[in-house]
Image (spheres, rainbow, N blue to C red):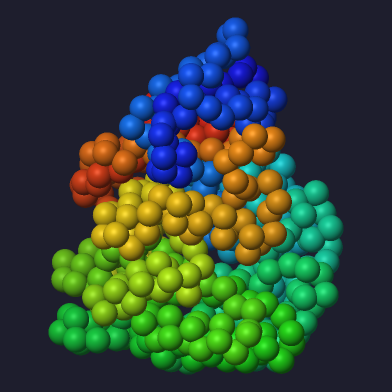
Amino acid sequence: MSDVIIRGARIYGEGEPQDVLISGGEIRGIGAGLDAPEGAEVIEAAGQVLLPGFVDLHTHLREPGREDTETIESGSAAGALGGYTAVFAMANTSPVADSVVITDHVWRRGQEVGLVDVHPVGAVTVGLEGKQLAEMATMASGIGKVKMFSDDGHCVYDPLIMRRALEYSSALGVLIAQHAEEPRLTVGAVAHEGPTAARLGLAGWPRAAEESIVARDALLARDAGARVHICHASTAGTVELMKWARGQGISITAEVTPHHLLLDDSRLETYDAVNRVNPPLREQSDIAALRQGLADGVIDCVATDHAPHAEQDKCCEFSAARPGMLGLETALAIVAQTMVETGLLDWRGVARVMSERPAEIVGLSDQGRPIAVGEPANLTLVDPDREWTVRAPELASIAQNSPFDAMTFGARVTTTLLRGRVTVGDGQVRP
Ligand code: NCD
Ligand code: ZN
Ligand code: ZN
Ligand code: ZN
């Protein structure tokens, strides 16, 4: 692995441009006009912002089972192109990642590909069925060292099972991430319950389906002295509940997706199922509350919920389509548009919500680190003035279900380094 020198980037978008020297997987020097060692790769980064590599707590790679839509390899490429150096691959694969055989495979395969660290998420319950706890300790002590457990795609709806999972997780020192959806309130639901769904004749998914579980799990975490993480927060009420729970000293964290920061349910007018997602796209008032919550730290971080689906599962009647949308390659551009261009976050804040907080929440010691000498060189360069148009077929993902297709954004990731290795340079993956 050759040495790398990044020339003239603004670190966290602050102060004067600096050079950053990287060798042996670490940051070895920071300063103006550093000498490049012989044979070092020079990355010209004038005008660009240097950030810690992003960490995605919520990614669906479809391996094993649906390699026709995404593999660990294609998803890793999408992640690296999006500026990620670590992603957490959700357990709702086929077979489900409810055993150490699967979780270890996911970790090993990710390391073989070598573009991002693919951390396996273990299932909370066997088969995601919500009935019997999975062997969390065995998965946690495997090679994949599972740090996060989630039945995502399903809610751990039985309060007694959730309570036991929380107790068990706190003894193991791992994180439980909840897909907050009261299933009785969402039977048949395909769209946000509101005027748009009513007019379009789509069955509604009420905010209370999410919020009632957020409130319940906050209380369960309080009583168990455990912590809980809320996946894909989508409503203004969830932001209010998070404020309340934090005020009570409850250990609860939450993520918001780029799509819930940008898109509202008016997107459903066309009945294009690319816009079907769980939880559903909500209203402008929810978007405003989520953005403000993220700016204030009430919502801790951004997570993509990158959810590839095959054409035949998306290009069908809205109510028959699978929920989910691609997210890895477009996340930074959307965060820049919704949070930086609006003045809600500066680039230091972007580092917090896309790298530092997610790494802290899940307990990754080598990611989300300060950009400083002696630290691991997990880094992302962002060009804050690079206009680009999303072309879904050109994304690295095998599936093409991006609702952002044909949209133009103003910022783009140009370069990603994983432990000093350039995984993306000039916007191209380096396998
Ligand atoms: C996810 C998927 O496709 O796996 N779909 C989605 O709409 N978000 C599951 C999930 O995150 O709940
Ligand atoms: Zn989910
Ligand atoms: Zn998900
Ligand atoms: Zn593609």
- In front here: 130 or 47? 47
User: In terms of image quadrants, where is residue 177?
Assistant: bottom right
284 lies left or right of 162: left
For the point 48% across and 87% down, which residue is it? 241
Q: Quadrant of the C terminus?
A: top right
- Does residue 359 lie above or below 389 as drawn? below
Residue at point 37%, 59% (across, down): 345
Res. 290 visible in picture: yes
Instruction: Pick the quarter of the image with the N terminus.
Output: top right
Name the residue located 84 percent from the left edge and 58 percent from the top edge.
141
Q: Residue at x 63, y 85 (%)?
A: 249
Count the marks: 0
**Where is residue 397 drawn, in percent x and y?**
43, 43
Seen from the viewer's position, the closer of residues 132 and 426 is 426
Q: Position of residue 303 (x, y in %)?
A: 48, 60
Q: Nearer the viewer, residue 251 or 283?
A: 251
Q: Is residue 379 above or below residue 407?
A: above
Q: Nearer the viewer, residue 35 or 428?
A: 35
